[in-house]
Amino acid sequence: MSSEMPLFDADAPQVSLSLMARGLDLDATLTSGQTFSWKRTPEGRWRGWIDHRPCLVWSDGDALRAVGPGLTRDAVSWYFALDLPVREIFATFPADPWLEKAQAFAPGLRILRQDPWETLCNFICSSLKQIVQIEQINHELRRVFGDEIGEGLHSFPDASRLALATEAKLRECKLGFRARHLFVAARQVASSEVSLERIATLPTAEAREHLIRIRGVGEKVANCILLFAYGRPEVFPIDVWVDRVLRRLYFNSSQRVKHERLRAFADSHFGPYRGYAQQFLFHWIRKDPKALPPEKVAPHRVRK
DNA sequence: ACCCAGGACTGAT
DNA sequence: ATCAGTCATGGG
C-alpha cells in the first residue's frame, strides 16, 4: 500500500454512465446510516465518491446515472451491488409482519459495497455519535487530511496519511475520545499489522476476529464493516436502534434483554440474508415516526 | 438542566 | 465470564 501514489488520477476523462438499476432508491440507500460521505445537491442528485473518484449520481427511471472522471461501469455496479439478485434475496426472508412493514417503507433500500478503510474509520467514529455527526467527522477528516481535488472536494485520507497525523490534530476533527482509537487503528493498518485486503479473502467469522484486533473495533463495528464494505449479507449488526426494535417487537419487552438472546434470535430468525433485514428494520424505525409506539413508563416509579 | 447518540475499553467482582 | 464506570461532543 503506497503512500505517495495518488489513488485518483486528476487528468482522467469525464465519464457518463447509465446502468440498469430497477427499484433502487438512492435517497433511502444513501441516508440509511451505512455511508457518510454523500451530499444531496439542490437538484436532488448526490455527490460522493466511488472507487476513490468523485462523482455525481442520480436516478433516471429504471436507470442509475453516474458522472465523474475515470468512472467505470464495473466500479459503479460493484459499489451499488447491482449484481445481486435482490428478488431472490428478499424471497428468503421469513414470513414476518414487522419485516414486511419495514421493507414496504423503503423497498428500494440497498446495501452498498464501500471501501473497507473508509468504512472502518466511519464506524470507529460512530461510537455514541449521531449519524449527522459521523457525516461531519467524515468531511472534517477529508478537509484536514485528504488531497484537494477541484472545488472543495477532498479525498478520504488513507491509513498511512492518518498514521502521520497526531492525536491532537485528529481531536480537532470533533472526534473526542475516538481520536486515540482512530490514530492507533491507522497505524495498525498502515503497518499491515492488520491487512484489510486479506480480510476480504477470509470466511466471515475469521474476518470478524481480525477486525476486532483493531483498536476501537468491537463486535458491532466489525459487523458494520463486514456488511457495508465486505459484502457479507449474513451479518446482522445490533446497535441501540436494532436492540430497541428487536426487544420491543419480537420480545415484547420494555425492559432490557440480554444481548446474547437478541443475537441468537436474529441469527436464526431472519435467514441467510439477515443483514438486509437488519437494514430495513433500522431504516424504518429511524425514519418512520409511527414505526414504534412510545415506550410505556413503568408505573409507581419513585422520582427524586 | 437533562438525556441520548449505529460502543469500546478498563478494572473490579 | 459478567458488569458498572468512563471516555468527548453536539443535538433535541
Image (cartoon, coloured by chain):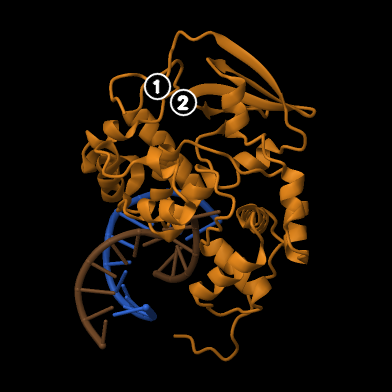
Chain colours: A orange, B brown, C blue
Q: Is residue A57 left or right of residue A134?
A: right
Q: Quadrant of residue A61?
A: top right
Asked if residue A216 is positioned above or below residue A132 in the image, the reply reads: below
Residue at horizontal 45%, vertical 42%?
A200
In the rendered image, residue A239, in percent from the top left (x then y), is placed at: 51, 61
> Is the C terminus of chain A in the top left, top right, bottom left or bottom right quadrant?
bottom left
Residue at horizontal 38%, vertical 56%?
A209
- Comparing A18 with A35, the one in front is A18
Asked if residue A181 is positioned above or below residue A198 in the image, the reply reads: below
Q: Is residue A225 left or right of residue A271?
A: left
Residue at horizontal 64%, vertical 54%?
A273
Residue bearing mark 1? A7
Chain hosting mark 1: A
The lab-note entry on whether marks 1 and 2 share a chain reads yes
Q: Can residue A125 be seen at all in this image of the molecule?
A: no
Q: Is residue A196 left or right of residue A29?
A: left
Distance from disc 1 to disc 2, alpha carbons, whole Å, reads 6 Å
User: How many C-alpha atoms fall within 10 Å of the one at disc 1: few (<14), some, or many (≥20)?
Assistant: few
Instruction: Assess whether mark 2 and mark 1 are in contact (beta carbons under 8 angstroms).
Output: yes
Q: Tell me the amino acid under the disc marked 1.
A: Leu
- Comparing A294 with A203, the one in front is A203
Q: Quadrant of residue A18?
A: top right
Q: Is residue B13 left or right of residue A269?
A: left
| Secondary-structure class at tag 2 | loop
